[in-house]
């Protein structure tokens, strides 16, 4: 995400997962970009590279806004920057793509972007699921707001409603397995925030925090990912990625019966392998908060 370490990662596998997620969510992200990007915008800074799916959509949209457009992608992970830069550069002609290895938690962020040969300010600064990883989230918002041209916008994407993929009763463990796993995930997140070095609480909602960061006319909207059962192969794969993420946080936070049930759902050799079910669905909502830097 550009704000924390990416050590000890199997990059080939990680990029494969990120690319699959990009493809799965492409229709919804294209609509988000359509709503955020104004006809007069010529520059975007994206904080957090991922595998470049969103960057590619930004490039395609910027290419239609006229000459002189540029996209700057910022992340701490060289592998992600390379992959995202290549995908974005291939998306359309006429848009300059810059990749900058920098940390969104560092006060030198704007300076590092400029040193890399990119403009340190843009019409739109976009950060998806990044700010909640920063130790001081309000300071992070102020830092990102400083990258916005006067009259431009900062857009951050944060969680709305937790993703759900399973029926209430999967026939393993007690009914409500996914609800318990999601609660464990929330416990993990709160512990992660509490133990983060330099962590500062943010006891206000995102729109108010953006106003405290100096932005005005703050608004919010949500996008829904709604793929009902039965899903195609890409949908089932997305559900499995979601369940695998929940597994990482489950060991010490849910009963052993729940861990065993989840392991069976994730095991291709199990009779209960989730990918063989025709009742998986994918339902989630994320929220975009947008604030304008005073002209």
Image (cartoon, rainbow, N blue to C red):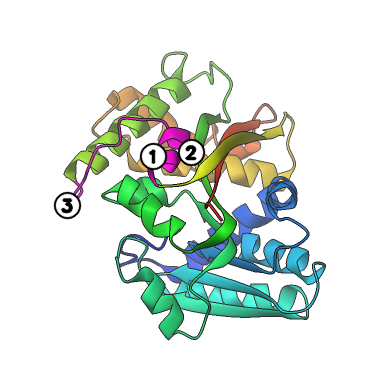
Image quarter of the N terminus: bottom left
The image shows residue 57 at horizontal and vertical percentages of 71, 62
Which tag is nearer the camera, tag 3 or tag 1?
A: 3
Q: Nearer the viewer, residue 172 or 17?
A: 17
Q: Nearer the viewer, residue 107 or 163?
A: 107
Q: Which mark sits nearer the N-terminus, 2 or 3?
A: 3
Q: Is residue 202 magenta?
A: yes
Which tag is nearer the camera, tag 2 or tag 3?
A: 3
**Label tally:** 3
Q: Residue at x 62, y 46 (%)?
A: 237
Question: Which residue does the numbered mark 2 point to in the structure image?
Answer: 243
| The furthest residue to the top | 175
The image shows residue 235 at horizontal and vertical percentages of 68, 42
Label 1 near label 2: C-beta < 8 Å? yes
Q: Residue at x 39, y 46 (%)?
A: 213
Label 1 near label 3: C-beta < 8 Å? no
SS state under label 1: helix
Question: Which residue does the numbered mark 1 point to in the structure image?
Answer: 247
Q: Nearer the viewer, residue 206 or 29?
A: 206
SS state under label 2: helix
Image quarter of the C terminus: bottom right
| The furthest residue to the front | 295
Q: Residue at x 71, y 45 (%)?
A: 28
Q: Residue at x 41, y 84 (%)?
A: 115
Q: Which mark sits nearer the N-terminus, 3 or 1?
A: 3
Task: Please state the extent of the stretch shown in magenta in the rendering.
Answer: 196-213
Q: Is residue 227 magenta?
A: no
Q: Is residue 189 above or below residue 145?
A: above
The image shows residue 47 at horizontal and vertical percentages of 48, 62
Question: Which residue does the numbered mark 3 point to in the structure image?
Answer: 197
């Amino acid at each position: 995400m550009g704000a924390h370490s990416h050590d000890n990662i199997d990059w080939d596998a990680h990029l494969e997962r990120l690319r699959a997620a990009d493809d799965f969510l492409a229709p919804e992200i294209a609509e988000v970009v359509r709503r955020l990007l104004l006809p007069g915008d010529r520059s975007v800074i994206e904080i957090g590279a991922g595998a470049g799916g969103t960057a590619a959509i930004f490039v395609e949209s910027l290419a239609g806004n006229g000459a002189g457009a540029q996209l700057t992608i910022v992340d701490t992970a060289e592998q992600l920057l390379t992959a995202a830069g290549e995908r974005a550069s291939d998306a359309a002609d006429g848009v300059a793509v810059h990749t900058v290895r920098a940390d969104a938690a560092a006060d030198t962020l704007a300076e590092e972007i400029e040193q890399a040969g990119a403009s340190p300010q843009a019409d739109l600064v976009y950060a998806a699921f990044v700010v909640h990883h920063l130790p001081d989230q309000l300071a992070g918002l102020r830092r990102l707001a400083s990258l916005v041209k006067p009259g431009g916008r900062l857009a951050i994407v944060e969680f709305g409603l937790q993703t759900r993929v399973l029926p209430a009763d999967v026939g393993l463990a007690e009914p409500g397995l996914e609800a318990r796993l999601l609660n464990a995930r929330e416990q993990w997140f709160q512990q992660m925030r509490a133990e983060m070095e330099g962590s500062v609480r943010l006891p206000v909602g995102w729109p108010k925090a953006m106003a405290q960061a100096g932005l005005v006319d703050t608004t919010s909207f949500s996008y829904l990912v709604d793929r009902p059962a039965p899903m195609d192969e890409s949908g089932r794969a997305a559900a499995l990625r979601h369940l695998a993420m929940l597994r990482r946080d489950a060991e010490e936070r849910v009963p052993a019966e729940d861990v065993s049930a989840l392991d069976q759902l994730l095991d291709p050799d199990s009779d209960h392998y989730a990918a063989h079910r025709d009742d998986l669905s994918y339902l989630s909502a994320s929220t975009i908060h947008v604030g304008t830097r005073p002209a």
